[in-house]
Structures are given as C-alpha cells and as structure tokens.
Amino acid sequence: MKKKLAILGAGRIGQVHARAIASNPIAELVAIFDPVKDAAEAVTSQFGGKISDIDSIVADTSIDAVILCTPTDMHADQIELFARNGKAIFCEKPIDLDAARVRSCLDVVAATKAKLMVGFNRRYDPHFMALKAAITDGQIGRPEMGVITSRDPAAPPAEYILRSGGIFRDMMIHDIDMAVFLMGAMPISVMATGAVLTDPDISTLNDFDSATAILKWSDGRQVSISNSRRAVYGYDQRIEIHGSDGMVQAHNERPVNIETATSQGYQRAPLHDFFMTRYVRAYANEIDAFISSISDDTTDIPTGQDGLNALLIADAALESAHSGQAVQINQD
C-alpha cells in the first residue's frame, strides 16, 4: 500500500519535494497546503493531490506523513502538532533558530515517538554519498583533516537574509552537518571569521557574506569550511577529506561534464548556477529515504538531534566570528 503524504508550503522547495513524491512508486501526494492559492494549485495540477488546510491534514488519519516547507519560525510548532497527531514528519532545516526551542520541540517528538527527519539534502548527493562510502570502507584510513568549500553565485534577497538566521545558521549549516557526518562525531570547538566583502548592504542586515570556520575534534582532527555569497564562476561545491592512508575528493559538478581541447587550450562547461539544479538527485534521494523510513526503522536519516547539533556548531561559529576567539561547543 502506498504511503500517503501531505506538503505544507508550495513554494520552490515544496515543488521539488512534490516531484520526488510523484516519482516514488510507494508514495502518493494526497494534500497540499499553502496560503497562496495559485501556488497550491500549481502543485496539485502537476503532481496530484488536493488543496487542503492544516486542520484537515491533521485530522485525516489516512495521511502517513507531512513534509514541512513552511517558514522557519513555523517549523517547531508544526512539528509538535503533527507529532502529537501520529504523523511522520520531514522538516526542512532548521527546526528553529533558537537551540532551546529546538530542544523543547525534540522533547515532544521523543514523548510521542514520532519519526522526524531534518532536510540535510547534501548527505544524499550521489557524489558525496560515494565520498562517505570511501571513508566508511576504510579506503583512506582514518579521516584526519577536511576542506569543505561552498560558494553561491550571488546573495539571496535582503528579506530572506533577515529571516534566515545569517550565513552561519543558513548557509554554512549544510557544510557543518556534512563535516560531522563525514568525520563521524561532534567537534569540541570552532574558530570562525566573517566579513562583508561582496555587498556592503549585507552589513546593515547584521550578517556576513564571506565566512570561514575551522572545526576541531577532541583528538585534534580538523575540518576547514569556506563560504562566500559570491562566486562569479558558478555554484561552487567541493569536499576533500584527508586520511591516514590517502585522500578522497568530490569535485564540482556541471550540467554537462565535457572538456574540449583546441589550439586555444582546454575548456570545460560552466558549473551549475544554483542549488536547485546541482542537487536535483540529492533532493529526490532524501525524500525516497524518508518514505522508506516511515515503515523501516533501519533506514538511516538525519534526525532532530542532527539538526540540533548543526545549529549548536553554527551558533558557536557565529559567536567566534564576533569575538575573535575559539568557542567551545556546548551540547548540554
């Protein structure tokens, strides 16, 4: 029997998840909620389901799970609502921008025994999955150091930055989660710097557009993360992990992976220009994993605790960027 899902939020990412549900043979999109009627209709007309409201989705016992693509400040309340009503929950990161609120939300998830998956889609990118497999299989020995590069072609709109939590909690948090995922444990401290190098207006939003963080583990292992809101050459996404017996890299991806050689030299196709095209397969894979996890508790997914861990590190990185000092990561 197919798993029945509802989506809250019919914007750009909601449409991506609707497409993934439609392509999964054991899932069915049955309901969509969005306060903008045209947005909801655009999803139902293309991927099926009916336009609904939140109360109806809560009350419908045939719906197995919900996918939350709503604004960040709604996530924790909606997670608790659906957890108390027996639904599995997929939530786009973050659960909340306040760690205390995340903890109280996770208490409800634990008390209700609800399944909660947090949307760290990069864990499901085929190239990064292969990199993780190389580490897990012991091909490079014990991972010791890493470099993660993540640079956007341009900054998001000001109104988005104001609600996002800033570069550490919104952009770098993906790389932070990848660092923990690849190294297999939480770091103990972070040293970070931030600057406004690409757009002076970003400083008026109390944010940075350029940031670097060095995560340190209790045994001395390190991962350096580099972020920028401007990369004139495209969407820059690279990972390198150095181990005791070697090194593994994931290079940038292009829509067309060809290289041309002429008398003028070598030329390659441009990079992807945004995350929506670069991570198409990752988004589909993560929704497939969520759907599988609804009936199979052995399926490994990013949990609410993973979401909290990444937020704690991001908070410490922001504190470090302002203080100029290394900051211990408090997990209490």
Image: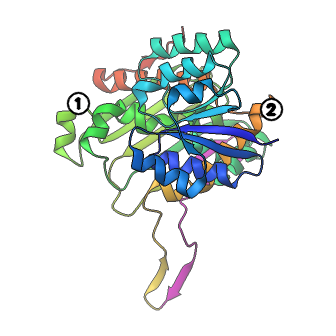
- Label 2: few (<14), some or many (≥20) within 10 Å? few
Q: Is residue 216 magenta?
A: no
- Compare residues 58 and 251 and report the one nearer the observer: 58
Q: Secondary structure at mark 1?
A: loop
- Residue 166: x and y in percent read 34, 33
**Mark toward the viewer: 2 or 1:** 2
* Left or right placement of residue 255 versus residue 98 in this view: right
In which image quadrant can residue 136 be found? top right
The stretch in magenta equals: 238-262
Instruction: Indicate whether 316 appears above or below 171.
Output: above
**In what quadrant of the picture does the N terminus appear?**
top right
Q: Amino acid at mark 1?
A: Asn
The answer to the question of whether label 2 and label 1 lie on touching residues, with beta carbons closer than 8 A, is no
Where is mark 1, residue-wise?
A: 206
- Label 1: few (<14), some or many (≥20) within 10 Å? few
Q: Which mark is residue 295?
A: 2
Q: Secondary structure at mark 2?
A: helix
* Left or right placement of residue 137 versus residue 77 in this view: right
Q: How many numbered marks does the figure carry?
A: 2
Q: Residue at x 58, y 47 (%)?
A: 17
